[in-house]
Image (cartoon, coloured by chain):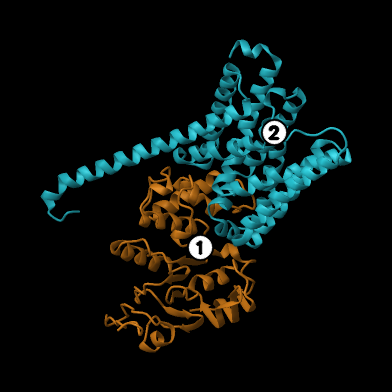
Chain colours: A orange, B cyan
Amino acid sequence: MGEPVITAEKVFFSYDGVPVIENASFSVAEREFLAVIGPNGSGKSTLVKLILGLLRPDSGKIRVFGKSPRKNSHCFGYVPQDVAINRSFPISVIDVVLMGRLRHHGSSRIRDRDRKSAVESLERMGMAGYENRKIDDLSGGQRERVFIARALTTDPDILILDEPTASVDTGGQAELYSLLRELNRTKTIIMVSHDLMVMSSSVTAVACVNRHVYYHDQGEITQDMLDMGYQCPVELIAHGQPHRILKTHEDES
Amino acid sequence: MIEALQFEFMRNALFAGLFASLICGVIGTFVLVNRLVFLTGGIAHATYGGIGVALFFGIPYVFGTLGFSLGAALIMTAVTMKAPQRSDTFIGVLWAVGMAIGIILIDLSPGYNVDLMSYLFGSILAVPAGDLWWMTGMGAVTLAVTIYFYRDMIAISYDVEFARLRGVPVHLLYFLFMALVAVSIVFIIRVVGLILVIALLSIPPYIAEKYAKSLGAMMVIAVILSAVFNITGLWVAYMLDLTSGASIILMAAAGFFISLAIDLLISRRRKRAAAQSRAENSPACGCGL
């Protein structure tokens, strides 16, 4: 793996005085497949938004290709959490994907070229023919593919997905992982997940977030990491010998 | 209705209603999908302060109300961006303060007193031809801005974080659209009153949202619906000799409740169909699903 594409140095962030991220330092190498894991409310989405430049750290520094994230925001393809999106909004699939081509040539106009790129991205995600369907009429898994298509049509260097498997069934998840593996050949991928169904054969690094960030540049999840970052029942499939670790809540009898 | 159009004031009322429909359908769609109905109500009410200022200082009505509505829009939008969780309180305060300033200044103005009722319900039957020109201009500006920034408007309304990552100047556009809302409100209140503005900004887009596949389609449906409410409302008012503004609002309200009833019927029928297919299928597969 080459030069780091993202570096974080002693990053602190708080909401209304409540610390969410404390003293996070790590660097993400090029073409890394980083899984960001941690329990609900641990600050995973916040960490991702700090990397994207949507939030500003209270202190510390984040650099993307050597510049502030805001200056390099065109490098990101972002797939937000499905639940964060207004569901009743009247919008067709193609209009969602075309958002990825906004300001592609510096203006707010959409050209034929952009339309072609949007259709290609949809084809790549197996969603050809759905262009004029209303997004609200699709299933959770289909919506997820549309959002990934939107991210891909921006031609990103770094693909960031926030809980992409939350509304996808098991078969769809396997398909999603094989697609991400393929994209990983040319792109750095950061994927947030809270259910820890991590396919370690794809993942090359893991960040455990629980206010602190524990970064491991190996795609394996060890008992130590779980003890540090994760205090919930977890289920994981690890590289090599598949095994499950089930840890119960301490406050449960 | 046809013979009523022989009167110039009736023709003006009809045109005013149609222009108001055009502006409200387009602006109202933006307001509704961004959940800004309350904020818009706040701007509309705060403009009453502008009427008071105009009267008290003897400046033209347009400058007073434009100043107040733009000022209220800018402050409310800024607060909504900075502290979204408390913005409703702040809007409520500005709403009341604007109206209170208006009433006090009108009290203090010598002689002539503005009728609060005509401000609330407008006087669509007394629209002077000059105002129609203003509304035509406003309609053209609203349409031009919306068409030019259509893609950006979709992006910031649907997924503002993604829009920001694409380099869309989110804050600037938000202020631009809110300024458009504020200016539209001023000219429409003048003819149809403040209550009708809020009704026309919210009811037609609300109904349109359920049937539209895109933001543009939602705007077109909302414009058509509000034109229908305006024409039928005017007709009823003329036939039965009722207050026109209130008649138009009741037409819109009727449309609102009819659409709710239709929704209810459709969802009931769907449920029944689903239950029926479950009943037919369950013996065969035996799993009860």
Q: Badge 2: how crowded within 10 Å, few (<14), some, or many (20+)?
A: few
Q: Chain of mark 2?
A: B
Q: Position of residue B165 (x, y in %)?
A: 58, 61
Q: The disc labelled 2 sits on which kind of residue?
A: Met
Q: Which chain does the numbered disc 1 sit on?
A: A
Q: Residues within 10 Å of mark 1 (few under 14, many from 20)?
A: many
Q: Amino acid at mark 1?
A: Tyr
SS state under label 1: strand
Q: Can residue A149 be seen from the camera position used here?
A: yes
**Is A67 on the left or on the right of B224, as rendered?**
right
Residue B236 placed where, x, y %? 56, 21
Q: Which mark is residue A78?
A: 1
The disc at residue B117 is 2
Q: Secondary structure at mark 2?
A: helix
Question: On the rendered structure, is A210 left or right of A234?
Answer: right
Q: Position of residue B207 (x, y in %)?
A: 48, 37
Residue closest to the eye, A103 or B117? B117
Q: Where is A87 relative to B230, above or below?
A: below
Q: Of A133 and A55, which appears nearest the observer?
A: A55
Q: Quadrant of the C terminus of chain A?
A: bottom left
Q: Is residue A195 above or below residue A252?
A: above
Residue B162 lies, with reference to residue B23, above or below; the image says below
Residue ID at (34%, 78%): A234
User: Looking at the image, can residue B70 be seen?
Assistant: no
Callouts 1 and 2 on one subunit: no
